[in-house]
Image (cartoon, rainbow, N blue to C red):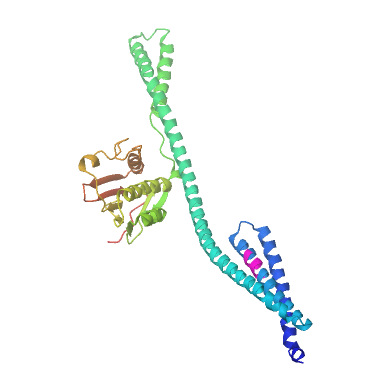
Amino acid sequence: MTLWSLSPVWFIDFSGSLGMIVVSCLCLGTARRINRKAPEHALASYLLWLSAAIFAFSISRSLGHIIKHGLYFSGYSDTWRHLSPVSGSINTLTFVVIGAVTLYFRQIETIMNRMSRDRDKITVFSRELLELNRDIESIVSERTRVEMGLRFAHEIRNPAMIIGGLARRMDKNMPEESPDRERLKQIVDQSEKLETLVNMLDQPEKKSSGKFEALELSALVEDVITIVQDEADRKGIIIILDRAPSPLTFQGNRHLIKIAFMHILRNGLESCASGDTIQVVTEAGERTVIAKFEDNGPGIPQEIADHIFDPFFTTREGSTGIGLPYVKQIIEEHNGSIVLSSSKNTGTLILIRLPPLLGELSRQE
């Protein structure tokens, strides 16, 4: 009589357990389809593992309830006492799996997000390096063409001048009625054309305006600091940017200027230790825009600072010694100047001045 009085409760428990099995089975099937479409996605793998653990729990828990009610109704309640510990241990095991999967994939998601951010940064750096490589190839090609023109002009200048000079002297000494005077005059004319051609080859073409554009100094420096900020954080070095209150516009090649600033900052990061600071200041000068890079690191002895911009001069083993000379070349090609002042144990200051070639400098008094 007691069994039949509890039959509605058992019926609801039986129906709910059966529904749990069906729903978990459907969830597992959906998770498998998602995982087939995106097998490398961490969230898809997490859903598959979680659905499998819940399905195992539903089989253990819900099927255990169904078997329990069946045994009670059929008069084998003692049998369930022997099966109950097995079902409970399986339930506990599924709880452990669900917790472990959740904690594991939470860490995996953090790592995947960090990898995604790093991949985006690498993509940006690769694109900038590709554009920089194209600019450098263009500059090298232009310089090679100009150098060949200058060499060619140098080789034919002396013969052209000698031929022209001798022809003019012969023309002066030749009688007016000489039949060869007209031929000599043609030689003089052709030698003058040749000298004109040599003078044209001797004047290199100006830089094409397509490589230079209007740039804002503070924004450019901020971009460079963003690139090296992770490296500075790992080393415990603080980078401070003191921006000018107004835009500092100048004309230049974005990628070359960025690579120059980046090389200066990385030199500062290599020389400084944890807890040191690098202060970057942008300000308006007298018909120039100024960028200052100052650190409180160990500094450079004066005898080394005097030769730091010399080609192939280096203080580090394994270094090529072309970094800072290349930076100086970039600044000078923009009609600017770079000055380094440092002494031992007092830090280093690098001062860069660039002329605002595009109109007057915008600044606040």
Q: Position of residue 246 (x, y in %)?
A: 34, 60
Q: Quadrant of the N terminus?
A: bottom right
Q: Quadrant of the C terminus?
A: bottom left
Q: Is residue 247 left or right of residue 20?
A: left
Q: Is residue 156 magenta?
A: no
In this view of the protein, which residue sits in the foreground, 97 or 181?
97
User: On the image, which quarter does residue 159 sit in?
Assistant: top left
Question: What type of secondary structure mainly makes up the magenta span?
Answer: helix
Point 35% across, 11% down: residue: 170
On screen, residue 212 above or below 47: above
In the rendered image, is residue 158 in sight? Answer: yes
Point 49% across, 51% down: residue: 122
Point 59% across, 60% down: residue: 42
Q: Is residue 361 left or right of residue 49?
A: left
Q: Position of residue 48 (x, y in %)?
A: 64, 64
Q: Is residue 53 magenta?
A: yes
Q: Is residue 215 left or right of residue 340?
A: right
- List the single residue furthest toward the right: 74
On screen, residue 172 above or below 61: above
In this view of the protein, which residue sits in the foreground, 71 or 24?
71
On screen, residue 113 above or below 89: above
Q: Position of residue 75 (x, y in %)?
A: 77, 82
Magenta part of the protein: which range?
49-54
In this view of the protein, which residue sits in the foreground, 63 or 12?
63
On screen, residue 50 above or below 227: below
In the rendered image, is residue 220 in sight? Answer: no
